[in-house]
Image: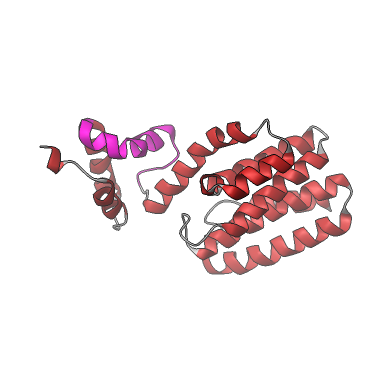
Amino acid sequence: MAQDHLTPEALRRLLEKDNDEEQNRLLLHHLEVCPGCNEVGGHIVALYRSGAIDLQFSVVDVDLGLSRAEAPGLWEELRGLPPAERSSQVMGAERFMTWGMVELLCSESLKLVREDEADRAVEEAGLAVWISLHLHEWQPAEEAWMVELRAYALAHLGHAWMRRGDLVQAECAFTLAANWWEAAAADMGDVLGYEKRILELSRRGA
């Protein structure tokens, strides 16, 4: 019956529970075989099948995975715009203010550095830092995770500035990135797997 299907609110409540792998496996199976529930939670099955989440997923893992999956489509809307207009679009629309966009812009900055486009690399990394600073707690993770994301974005900005020859700016970014990273990682460790990249970017800048 229609009233027995999961609603978005009910699915959210299920995800917020401390489920084990077997419970998550059963949830995935249900979402896959029930057409009505698949309409609400099919994106979770897609994330699992793509490898974006594993069977130990929590609500934060799902939200992060969805944010990352949506980022390329958002970037396509912005890619061809002039830098000033691109920044204006991002700053004026909440849908662009996501974790996935921060990570994607950092990746774009690295690509531009490799292509000797340091000015554009600074623009993309700077936008990543701006978004990271304007995300609120539980968008989609706790504050310590947000601090690690900001450190990650700042390390990319420092790297881009270094490649552009702005040594003072680069050193400020690297120093702030290190301070934020150490503060957050001391509390929660490298839960996001960012530490290696941050260290690599800092060393390349040295």
Residue 96 horizontal/vertical position (percent): 55, 45
What are the residue bounds of the magenta stretch? 33-55
In the rendered image, which quarter contains the N terminus? Answer: top left
Residue at coordinates 27% horizontally, 55% vertically from top-left?
A: 13
Residue at coordinates 73% horizontally, 40% vertically from top-left?
A: 83
Colour style of the rendered protein structure: secondary structure
Q: Is residue 145 left or right of 25 when viewed as pictured?
A: right
Any part of residue 106 in sight: no
Q: Is residue 183 left or right of 165 when viewed as pictured?
A: left
Answer above or below: position of 35 versus 106: above
Residue 108 horizontal/vertical position (percent): 68, 38
Q: Is residue 131 left or right of 45 when viewed as pictured?
A: right
Residue at coordinates 75% horizontally, 44% vertically from top-left?
A: 123
Overall secondary structure of the magenta stretch?
helix
Residue 195 horizontal/vertical position (percent): 63, 54
- Splitting the image into 4 quarters, where does residue 132 fall? bottom right
Answer above or below: position of 186 versus 145: below
Residue toward you, 152 or 135:
135
Any part of residue 194 in sight: yes
Would you say residue 49 sits in the magenta stretch? yes
- Splitting the image into 4 quarters, where does residue 4 fall? top left
The total of numbered circles placed on residues is 0
Residue at coordinates 37% horizontally, 52% vertically from top-left?
A: 59
Answer above or below: position of 64 versus 37: below
Would you say residue 27 sits in the magenta stretch? no
Residue 175 horizontal/vertical position (percent): 76, 63
